[in-house]
Image: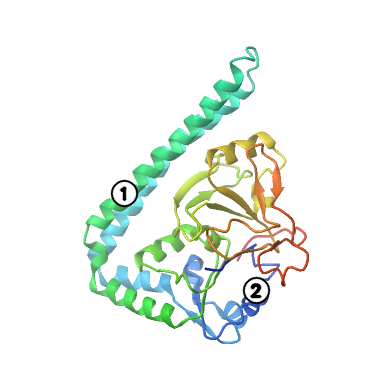
Amino acid sequence: MTTILLGPQRFTVTVAAVVRSLGLDGPVAMINSGWEEREDDDGELSGHFAGAARNLRLHHRLLDAIEKDPQFAADARTFRNRHDELRAFYGIRLQAAVDAVDAVRHRTSIERVGPAAEQAAVEAVRDVDAWYTYELEQLYADVAASSGDQSGPIGWHRGEVGAMLDECAAVVIAGGNVRTLLRTLRLFRVTLPADRPVVAWSAGAMALTGRVVLFNDFASQGIAAPELHDTGLGRLPNVVALPHARRRLRLDDRERMSLLARRFRDDDLLLLDDGTVVRIPDEDAGLPAGARTIGTDGAVTTSGTVPVGAASGATAASTAPDRTGSDA
């Protein structure tokens, strides 16, 4: 079950070389529904695969289902509204809990109590994350209990998507809007074949994990703390993918990074910057040598060292020099 996570592809394109290195015998399935209305503008991306690409067009299929099935369209609006409301309540609780951690950290009048108080404050943040996760699961359960996504158009698209995946030798998942990407992957029940490689970056990398975390430490408004957004496909269940890490995280703020790592201490917080290639042969193998993560002390660490004589980086992670810009 080879899974390869890449850094952003706008300025440092690595996907073509990575896919070539797989020695594929068959077409590549492309999922770029995160691009939304630009989904069909895939000439540059498909050009990397020498014409052997098959665009699954999941966003186009979503719009088709909305147009042809009024009940599904109504159910989809209801779900989106309820999810937005849940996220609003979560954001209020989350920011208050994170502010409490900061306040406790900087109150040093009683040193004996301080560490325990800080740990309790961190656990309170984790409790808020757990509450949101539970409520989101209940929301999805309500959707599953409805009949809105069992319509004829959706069933037809699911069958066609499944057939296209069966014919492909690998799957490539691009970036874009992670909410739209996850919505289309779920709606059409995209199952990534365990015996075929998957290459993904940015929102695509996030979608492969167990928990999708939104973050931007430099945002001028809104919730300042990183937020749980959704669950991913779970191909890499114990990884939290952090694309554009250097541009979106205050990596030099050890206290802030420590809180992030302690909130998700059961997961590897994987930094995916320009030029990064992280090749994971199996979900149980852990991250390869060279992968950069955030430790609970707030420091950025690099796992292991690249073994001498490793075959063309088969299990190694590599990172090119940092650049600026954002993903396509």
The circle on residue 18 is 2
Q: Is residue 158 above or below residue 210?
A: below
Q: CA distance from mark 1 to mark 2?
A: 38 Å
Q: Image point 60% across, 27% down: which residue?
A: 102
Residue 316: image x %, image y %?
69, 63
Residue 20 picture location, percent across and down: 64, 80
* Residue 119 appears in the picture as rendered: yes
Say above or below: 148 vs 114: below
* Quadrant showing the C terminus: bottom right
Residue 207 % position (x, y): 49, 60
Q: Amino acid at mark 2?
A: Val
- Structural crowding at the residue carrying mark 2, measured as other residues with C-alpha within 10 Å and reported as few (<14), some (14–19) or many (≥20): some
- Disc 1 crowd rating (10 Å Cα; few below 14, some 14-19, many 20+) is some
Seen in the image, is 301 located left or right of residue 63? right
Q: Nearer the viewer, residue 270 or 181?
A: 270
Q: Determine which residue is flagged by label 1.
A: 139
- SS at circle 2: helix
Rendered image quadrant of residue 172: bottom right
